[in-house]
Structure formats: C-alpha cells, structure tokens
Amino acid sequence: MGLSPVSIEAAPDGTGLSTEITIPGFSKGIGLKDLAIMSRQMSTMASAGLSLMKTLTILADQTESKPLAKILGTVRDDVEIGSSLSDAMRKHHKDFPPIMINMVKAGETGGFLDKALDTVATNFEKEAALKNSIKSAMTYPVVVVGMVVLAVAGMLIFIVPVFKDMFEGMGGTLPLPTQILVTLSEQMIWLGPLILVLAIAGTAWWKSHKNDESVRKFLDPLKLKMPVFGLLMKKLAVARFSRNFADMIGAGVPILQSLQIVGETSGNYVIEEALKKVSDSVRQGKSIAGPMAEEDVFPPMVVQMVAVGEDSGAMQQMLEKIAEFYDQEVQTMTDSLTSLIEPLLIAFLGIVVGGMIVALYLPVFNIATLMQ
C-alpha cells in the first residue's frame, strides 16, 4: 500500500492467535511436586556454578508445568533488570509459598542460596509425599461413597417406578419404608437436578472462598474437633509447623519472622492464631515454650521438646525430631484408618442398598393378604 512502518513492537506472549485457552476448574496449577523439582534443580545448578540467569532460563525451558514455566520466564526478566531473586518471586506470592520466598531471601543474604534451595526442595518433597499418602488413603472411601450415591439414584430413578406400578395394581396400603422410597422416586424429577446444581454451585463457591478468613475461622476449629480425623489433622498441622520452623531457623531467618511464616503455612487457622500469640509474647522478651504451653493445640511433648531446644541451643534439631515423630504418627494413623474404613464402608454399602431392596420387597410378602 506504499506505507512505511513508524514503530514496531513485539506482541506479548499468549495474546492474539497464540492465546492459551483454559477452562476454569480444569486447568492444572502449580503443585508442590513442581516446586520441589524446580528447587532441587535450581540448587544443583547453583552449586555447580551456573549463573542465576542461565539457571532460570534452563528451568523455564525444561519444566513440564506450563504455568510455572511462564512465571519463571517473568522472574528471569525481573532478575535481568536488577531485581533480586526473592523480590522477583515475591511478585508471584500466590504461586510461591511464603516459606520458599523467605528461605531464598535468607540464602541470598547469607551467600548459601544453593543450600537454602536444597532445604526448600526437601521440605516440599516430604510435604508432597505426606499429602499423596493421605490422598491414597482417602481414594477408596470416596469411590465407595460415589458408588453408593450412584446405586441409590439408579434404583430411585429406574427400579422403584417399576415396583410402584406393580404395587398400585395390588391395592392395599404400602409399608412405611416402601412409601418413603416411592415418594423419593417421585420427587427425583426435580430433586436430582436441584442436588446437582447445588453441588456444582457449592464446589465453585468453595474454590473461591475456602481461604477466606471468615470461612477458615469457622471451619478449622471444627476440623480439629472431628472424631478420629480431628486428631489426624492436628498431628499433620503440628508436623508441618515443626518442619517449616526448623528449616527457617536453619536458614538464619529471624525468630519473629519465622513464627509468622510458619503460622501462615501451617494450614490451620487455630495454629496460625496461636503462633501469633506466641510471636507477641516473644516480642516482649518471653520464651517460645512458655506461650506455647498456654495453647491447647500444641501437645505437651512438643512444648517440652521446644523448651529443651531453647535451653540447650539445639532448637532446630529438636524441631526436626518433632517433625519426624509426627510424620510417622500421621503415616501410622493413616494406614490404620485405611484398614478400619474399608470394612465399615462395605457394611455401609450393604446396609443402604440392602435396605432399599428389602423395602421394595416388603409389599411382596403381603401379596396373599392383598389378594384375599
């Protein structure tokens, strides 16, 4: 057309025809496993003498997680223009946990970034292994409960109406359990879609608001009071607190800052609030073990070992032993629950489905009376 370009600018990545389409709720985020692998690789390359820019470039190119690769590219660009690694990561605080950012900052300040990243990788690997163990233990119960729901819905929609027509031809009054089944079957026309819509809406609301302070303030205390599972969650939170606190102390992060960070990463509002009170007491010159003893969420053994660690100057070692102990406790308790839940769920499945079958056949037992 006889035109000359006045200026040319590169289009940002992921715009125009190269826009990556993601479906809300189905796109895979950044998991602990991705962060653990990234930290381990970064630690290895840093200890081998590679420059930070080269390390970030390699990680951005070879990581399997697309969201993490995109963030690493942004972090590399920020580092290239003079930002520190911790400051560049802090801009993505929703993707990088506070403990990782502060450990990297401590490593930068003390000149041991490779060791700090190695500690972060070990921490995340243990955390991921523990979560996978709990998920594996919960897979069987979730599958069985899903089968029960599908079986009940199938019987109400397809089987009960057939028996209903047969019952109406007999005349007489149906037994109460059979009447309940027939009524539920008739209401499934609108009750089924309503339950499905409420389940989808509830899931969407939970994903958006599960981290709200008001929600956590209400639910987290209830989680710790649940029968059996409450004790498991309490041990899990104590193990996470002890491991993170030990890593922060080992990296040279100040105690007050460490208490704040481990509270945020504990995963439970009750422990987070308890550690805020402990932090306030330490700020006033008190010990750590004293305020912890006043909080019911910390077992006496934890308080005593922290007190010994303070007195002997071996706080990190004591916290690591606490973390190892409660990791084993969680693993043992998870295995025991798995063994206990399986027969209970099978019995539950038999009672529900068997009860419905008995309710359907109760009128058949009265056929002779009805025919007279």
Image (cartoon, rainbow, N blue to C red):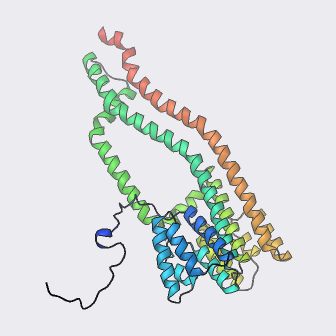
Residue 298 percent location from the top left of the image: 70, 65
Looking at the image, which residue sits at the far front? 2
Q: Please tell me which residue lies in front, 47 or 257.
A: 47
Q: Say if residue 243 shows up in the picture.
A: yes
Q: Say if residue 280 shows up in the picture.
A: no
Q: Residue at x 54, y 45 (%)?
A: 139
Q: Please tell me which residue lies in front, 17 or 120.
A: 17
Q: Please tell me which residue lies in front, 54 or 173.
A: 54
Q: Please tell me which residue lies in front, 209 or 247.
A: 247
Name the image quarter holding the N terminus: bottom left
Residue 307 percent location from the top left of the image: 80, 72
Name the image quarter holding the C terminus: top left
Q: Residue at x 64, y 39 (%)?
A: 340
Looking at the image, which residue sits at the far bottom? 6
Judged left or right of residue 312, residue 220 is left
Q: Residue at x 50, y 71 (%)?
A: 60
Looking at the image, which residue sits at the far top? 372
Mark count = 0
Can you tell which quarter of the image residue 168 is in? Answer: top left
Residue 76 percent location from the top left of the image: 51, 80
Judged left or right of residue 254, residue 187 is left
Looking at the image, which residue sits at the far right? 312
